[in-house]
Image (cartoon, rainbow, N blue to C red):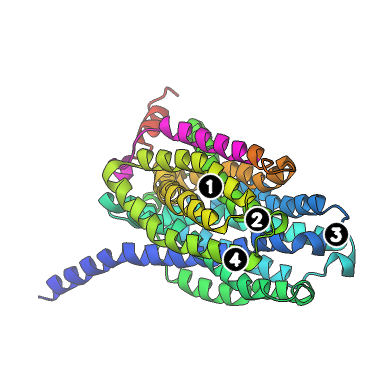
C-alpha cells in the first residue's frame, strides 16, 4: 500500500512539475524583462534630454536609442558565456545569475547622475550598466526556454514553453504601468526625480525573482545527461562543429524581433515626440496590447502543438511585415483609434504568434548537450541586429506625412527574412526530445577518426 501511495505521489509531483516550471519561468521572465523594458521606455521618453542634451532633438533621440541598442550589442558576447554555463552546469544556475545581474544593474541606473550633474561621465556610466543588462538578457530567454521545453510533456512542448515569452509580455506591462503615473507628472518633476522610481523598484524585483527561481528543479533530460557524463566539455565548440547551420538559421529567424523593438521604442517616441499623441495615451495603449498578448501567446503555443511550429511562426512574421505599414500610417495621422486597431493586429495577433512558438521552435533545433548555447547564440545575434532598429529608424525617418515609409520597409524586410529562415528549417513538433539534433550527433560520432 505504501509503495503504491509513493508511486501515486511521484506521479502527481511529475504532473505538477511542468506547471511549476511554466509558472516559474513566466514570473521570472516577467520580472527580468520589467527591468529590461523600463530602460526602453525611459530611452523613448526622457533619456535624450537627461543624458544627451543637444540642440537638435533628433540627434538627442538617436543617441538615446543607441544606448538602448548597446544592450543588444552585449548579447552575443554574453550568449557565449551564458550558454557555456547553462549547458555545463544546468538551466537553473543560469537563471539565478541572469536575474541577479539584471536587477543590480537596473537599480544602479536609478541612482546615476545626469549629464547636467556629472557631464560626460553620466552617459558613459549609463552605457556600462546597459551593457550589463544586455549580458543578463542574453541568458534569460535561452535559459527559460530550455527549462520549460525540457520539463514539458511531449505533446505540449509548444504550449508549456510559450509561457517563457508570455512572461516577457508581462514584464512590458509592468514596466509601462510603472511609467504611467510617472509620465503624468509635470515635466519638472519627471526629469528631476520621477524617472528614477521604476528603476529603484528593481530591489523588489531581485527579491521576488530570486525566491521564485531557487524553487526551480533542474530538468530531467539535463540531469540524465549529467548522470551519464554526457554534458559537453566545450558546448560552444561542439555546437558550431555539429549544428553551425542551425545557428545561422536561428540568427535570421530572430529578426522577427525587429517588429517588437520598433513598436515598443521607436513607435512610442514617434507618436509622442513627433506626432504629439499624449504620452499617457500611448503608454495605456501599449499596456492594453500586451495584456491581450498574455492570453494570445499560450493560445498560439497550443496551436503549434497541433499543426507545427513553422506555420505559426511564418504566419506571424509575414503578418507583421504587412501590417506595420497601416500602423505607421495611422501614427503619422495621429489617429488614436486606428493606432489602437492596427497595434493590436501587429503585436497581439501576428507578433504574438511568432513569439509564442519561438522557445519551442528554437530549442527543438538543438540536442540537449548544446541546446542552451544554440538558442542563446543564435537568437541573441539576431536580436542584436533587431536592437539596432530603433536607432536606425530614427535616422531613416523623413520629414513630411510619408516620412515613415523607410521605417516600414526596414520592418517588412526583417519579417520576410525571418519567415524565409523558418521555412528552411525542419518541422520538429512531433519529434521526441531525446532525438532532437540526433542526425547531427550521428554524423559526428560516425565520422572516421
Q: Where is residue 21 in the image (x, y as percent from the top left)?
A: 38, 63
| First reached walking from the N terminus: tag 2 or tag 3 | 3
Mark 2 vs mark 3, CA separation in Å: 21 Å
| First reached walking from the N terminus: tag 4 or tag 3 | 3
**Closer to the eye: label 4 or 3:** 4
| Residue 110: quadrant of the picture | bottom right
Question: Which quarter of the rendering shows the N terminus?
Answer: bottom left
Q: Do the residues labelled 2 and 4 touch (CB within 8 Å)?
A: no
Q: Mark 2 points at which residue?
A: 271
Q: Residues within 10 Å of mark 1 (few under 14, many from 20)?
A: many
**Closer to the eye: label 2 or 1:** 2
| First reached walking from the N terminus: tag 3 or tag 1 | 3
* Tag shown at residue 281: 4
Residue that appears at 28% across and 42% down: 307
Q: Name the residue under label 1.
A: 376
Q: Mark 3 points at which residue?
A: 53
**Closer to the eye: label 4 or 1:** 4
Q: Where is residue 243 in the image (x, y as percent from the top left)?
A: 47, 34
Q: Which of 367 and 228 is in front in this view?
A: 367
* Residue 11 in view, yes or no: yes
Mark 3 vs mark 1, CA separation in Å: 36 Å
Q: Does the magenta stretch include residue 201?
A: no
Residue that appears at 32% across and 56% down: 152
Q: Nearer the viewer, residue 203 or 321?
A: 321
Q: Which of 52 and 23 is in front in this view?
A: 52
Mark 4 vs mark 3, CA separation in Å: 26 Å
Q: Where is residue 326 in the image (x, y as percent from the top left)?
A: 54, 44
Of helix, strand and loop, which one carries label 1?
Answer: helix
Position of 48 with respect to 323 (left or right) is right
In the rendered structure, which segment of residues is drawn in magenta? Answer: 407-435
Q: Which of 125 and 303 is in front in this view?
A: 303
Q: Residues within 10 Å of mark 2 (few under 14, many from 20)?
A: many
Amino acid at each position: 500500500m505504501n509503495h503504491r501511495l509513493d508511486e501515486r505521489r511521484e506521479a502527481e509531483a511529475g504532473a505538477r512539475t511542468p506547471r511549476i516550471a511554466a509558472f516559474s519561468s513566466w514570473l521570472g521572465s516577467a520580472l527580468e524583462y520589467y527591468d529590461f523594458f523600463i530602460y526602453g521606455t525611459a530611452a523613448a521618453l526622457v533619456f535624450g534630454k537627461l543624458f544627451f542634451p543637444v540642440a537638435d532633438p533628433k540627434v538627442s533621440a538617436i543617441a538615446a536609442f543607441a544606448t538602448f541598442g548597446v544592450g543588444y550589442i552585449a548579447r552575443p558576447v554574453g550568449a557565449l558565456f551564458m550558454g557555456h554555463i547553462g549547458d555545463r552546469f544546468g538551466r537553473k544556475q543560469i537563471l539565478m545569475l541572469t536575474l541577479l545581474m539584471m536587477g543590480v544593474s537596473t537599480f544602479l541606473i536609478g541612482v546615476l547622475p545626469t549629464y547636467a550633474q556629472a557631464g560626460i561621465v553620466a552617459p558613459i556610466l549609463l552605457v556600462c550598466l546597459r551593457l550589463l543588462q544586455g549580458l543578463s538578457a542574453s541568458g534569460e530567454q535561452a535559459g527559460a526556454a530550455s527549462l520549460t521545453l525540457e520539463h514539458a510533456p511531449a505533446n505540449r512542448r509548444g504550449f508549456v514553453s510559450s509561457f517563457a515569452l508570455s512572461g516577457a509580455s508581462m514584464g512590458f506591462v509592468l514596466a509601462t504601468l510603472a511609467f504611467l503615473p510617472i509620465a503624468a507628472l509635470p515635466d519638472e518633476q519627471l526629469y528631476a526625480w520621477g524617472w528614477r522610481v521604476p528603476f529603484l523598484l528593481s530591489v523588489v524585483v531581485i527579491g521576488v525573482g530570486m525566491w521564485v527561481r531557487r524553487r526551480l528543479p533542474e530538468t530531467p533530460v539535463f540531469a540524465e545527461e549529467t548522470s551519464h557524463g554526457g554534458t559537453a566539455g566545450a558546448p560552444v565548440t561542439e555546437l558550431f562543429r555539429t549544428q553551425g547551420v542551425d545557428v545561422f538559421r536561428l540568427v535570421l529567424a530572430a529578426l522577427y524581433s525587429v517588429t517588437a523593438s520598433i513598436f515598443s521604442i521607436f513607435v512610442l517616441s514617434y507618436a509622442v515626440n513627433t506626432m504629439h499623441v499624449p504620452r499617457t495615451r500611448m503608454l495605456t495603449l501599449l499596456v492594453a496590447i500586451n495584456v491581450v498578448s498574455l492570453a494570445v501567446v499560450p493560445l498560439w503555443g497550443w496551436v503549434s502543438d497541433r499543426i507545427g511550429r513553422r506555420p505559426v511562426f511564418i504566419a506571424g512574421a509575414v503578418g507583421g511585415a504587412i501590417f506595420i505599414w497601416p500602423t505607421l500610417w495611422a501614427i503619422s495621422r495621429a489617429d488614436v483609434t486606428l493606432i489602437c486597431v492596427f497595434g493590436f493586429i501587429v503585436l497581439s495577433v501576428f507578433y504574438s504568434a511568432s513569439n509564442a512558438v519561438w522557445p519551442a521552435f528554437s530549442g527543438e533545433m538543438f540536442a540537449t548537450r548544446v541546446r542552451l548555447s544554440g538558442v542563446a547564440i543564435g537568437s541573441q545575434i539576431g536580436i542584436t541586429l533587431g536592437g539596432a532598429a530603433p536607432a536606425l529608424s530614427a535616422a531613416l525617418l523623413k520629414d513630411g506625412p510619408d516620412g515613415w515609409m523607410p521605417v516600414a520597409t526596414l520592418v517588412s524586410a526583417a519579417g520576410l527574412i525571418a519567415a524565409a529562415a523558418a521555412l528552411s528549417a525542419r518541422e520538429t513538433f512531433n519529434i521526441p526530445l531525446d532525438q532532437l539534433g540526433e542526425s547531427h550527433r550521428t554524423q559526428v560520432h560516425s565520422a572516421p577518426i
